[in-house]
Image (tube, rainbow, N blue to C red):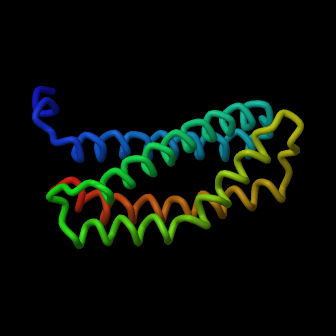
Amino acid sequence: MFFSLFLSKNQKLVKNWKKEHQQIVKLATKVIEAYSNNKITTAKKELKTLRLVALNHLMTEDIEFRRLLENKSTLETETKAFIDEFKNSFYDTKAVLMRFLKDYSCDDAVLDDKFFESFKGLVSVLAERIAFEEENLYSKLDNN
């Protein structure tokens, strides 16, 4: 508990972002479980929460990544390049994710088999991306 008082700003960001990743995964799992059990109202509720959590996470990441790239800090050049590459490579996936969540979290959206297959595919891509982000980018930030 007291150890967190001595974390750098980057370490605190990484710790918080990992918690948000866990929350995103948990919410995605709840959507899948609810839909699989034909609890469409619950699936929509969890989908709306997922949208808010994901939007907040992505906005915070974008702001902090921009700050890190623009800051004349001691952040290693390699780490800055990695952040830049990460942002650019995730741009399209992020746009698809946000559009999908916006469309399907509306009150009048129909959660059907098409939705479910698309959602599972998107969750799979995000799971890979989260693992990559935590194992590579976050580990670099955690050590700066």
> Which residue is depicted at the point 33% across and 70% down?
82
Q: Specify the quadrant that holds the N terminus.
A: top left
Residue sitting at x 81%, y 38%: 106
Which residue is depicted at the point 68% across and 39% down?
A: 47
Instruction: Name the residue rendered at 32%, 59% in the picture.
Output: 69
**Residue 73 in picture, x, y percent from top left:** 18, 55
Is residue 94 left or right of 18 when viewed as pictured? right
Q: Is residue 139 above or below residue 112?
A: below
The front one of 89 and 17 is 89
The spot of residue 125 in percent (x, y) is 56, 65
109 in relation to 134, above or below: above
Name the quadrant containing residue 12.
top left
The front one of 136 and 86 is 86
Front in this rendered view, residue 23 or 99: 99
Quarter of the rendering occupied by the C terminus: bottom left
- The quadrant holding residue 40 is top right
Determine the image quadrant of residue 30.
top right
Numbered disc total? 0
Residue 139 appears at what percent x and percent y?
Answer: 24, 59
| Above or below 65: residue 77 | below
Q: Position of residue 74 (x, y in %)?
A: 14, 58
